[in-house]
Image (cartoon, rainbow, N blue to C red):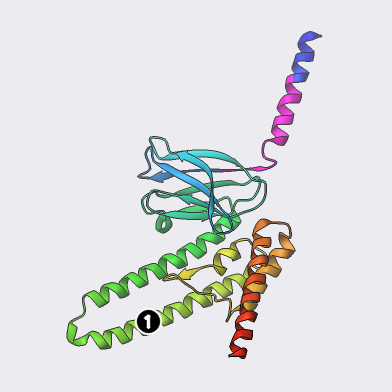
Amino acid sequence: MTSIRKLIIIAVVVMMAACSGGKDTYQISGKLENGANATVYLMEMENESVRAVDTIILDGKGKFSVKEKLDNPSIFILQCPNDYIMLCPQVGEKIVLSGDVDNMAVTYNVSGSEESSKLKLLSDKQVMTRVALQNMSEQLKMTDIDDIDSVKHEVSRLYHSLRDNQKEFLINYINTNEGSLTTLVALYRNMENTPLIDFTNDFDVYKKVLNGLKKNYPDNKHTKNLEALIRNLDKLQQQQITNDAEK
């Protein structure tokens, strides 16, 4: 009887552990090229900063596997030595990553997470834009001084065309992924430190993102932060209009 009782207790403990193991966690694993014994950092996006979540040390083959607690859906950054990627895990997901640790944004692939795969679409577009800007810069450097004005004019035209294309892509992404936390990343995208979606000219886009998040994540901190931001920006905008009218 004692042995049977012990077996029953062990079975119950195992079952309880199995049932509770993935209730509020997710897993990230993978193998990164050139990542032998490298250190990467997992951070969570906060309102205007990031919060350290975990320090991950890759093994001698660049492999790693970690399980993380997830209280509420959020956007995370995996910071590599020279680059970073963004992830949006959901409870129970087993995310698998691959890529080159020294050039992560350009080379990485992700599976096992639908929202993280969406973020890769945004990352790929950003990489393409970054390459185009670098090509423009190189073109200016190699230009003969006698032809500099015409080249500057052409580069300026290409630059504005690139901005328009990037903005159109982001707005289309927001429209087709309404309610996803990843739309926040699209909303806040910059180009040369200038917002691509501007609050003053694109207030309807800000509202669309907020309305989608309020439907899917009404109590999420990112939803509340965006709502507060829109409220404050709208207040400042109305104050500016009043000040201009009084001049």
Residue at point 26%, 77% (across, down)? 140
Q: Give the range drawn in magenta.
A: 10-27
**Vertical relation: 189 (above or below) 58:** below
**Residue 5: image location, x then y, percent:** 79, 14
Q: What residue type is labelled 1?
A: Leu
Q: Which of 191 and 94 is in front in this view?
A: 191
In the rendered view, does 19 fall on the left or right side of 45? right
In the rendered view, does 217 fall on the left or right side of 143? right
Q: Residue under circle 1?
A: 158
**Residue 102: image location, x then y, percent:** 36, 50
The quarter holding residue 229 reads bottom right
Q: Which of 238 and 183 is in front in this view?
A: 238
**Vertical relation: 104 (above or below) 30:** below
Q: Secondary structure of the magenta portion, mostly?
A: helix
Membership of 14 in magenta stretch: yes
Residue at point 73%, 60% (across, down)? 218
The quarter holding residue 18 reads top right
Residue at point 48%, 43% (across, down)? 30
**Vertical relation: 161 (above or below) 113:** below
